[in-house]
Amino acid sequence: MIRFWDTADPPTNANLGLLEGLGADWRGLTTEQALQKYEQVIGVRRTLPAVVARHFNFPFLEIGGEAPSWMPQRREERSKQLCDAINEGLDHVATERALQTGGGADFSDRPQTKGEAIMKALEVLQKAWTRGS
């Protein structure tokens, strides 16, 4: 089931959608593929505002160099635990009314996206350009 994320913050909506995809079954992944998924989850976790991030209780993410030594069964067990945690967190986020548009949640501690940084740089450049004309 794909959800429609309706927070007041479009980047958070996009990241929740990405987490939803990452919460799908990882069975059959190679070690390298699983490590890429872990990296993606870590990356998304870093971009979530605190009001959203508090809904996720990831059992582990910082696995260091131990993952390549996992047997396929252990890799699948760990992957299932992580997917379950992602989906549980998404369920909590989906039911919290304060996170929906108009709910009053504060997303201001979310890190700036690359697109927002580029737009800000372009605004500064445009102002400097128009002053110099």
Image (spheres, rainbow, N blue to C red):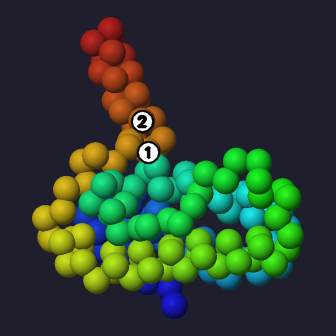
Q: Is residue 44 visible?
A: yes
Residue shown at 49%/79% (left/top)?
87
Query: Dot 1, how many residues are within 10 Å of its Cα: few (below 14), some (14-19), or many (20+)?
Result: few
What amino acid is found at the position of numbered circle 2 in the picture? Ala
Q: Is residue 72 left or right of residue 13?
A: right
Taking the image as shown, residue 19 lies to the left or right of residue 33, namely left
Picture layout, residue 70 above or below residue 28: above
For mark 2, what is the residue?
Answer: 117
Q: Quadrant of the C terminus?
A: top left
In the displayed structure, 106 sits above or below 56; it is: above
State which quadrant residue 98 falls in: bottom left
* Residue 89: x %, y % from top left: 42, 74
SS label for mark 2: helix
- List x then y, in percent, for residue 50: 30, 55
Q: What's the amino acid at mark 1?
A: Thr
Residue 57 coordinates in the image, percent (x, y): 44, 67
Q: Residue furthest top?
A: 132
Q: Which residue bears the numbered disc 1?
A: 113
Picture coordinates of residue 49 (x, y %)?
33, 54
Q: Secondary structure at mark 1?
A: loop
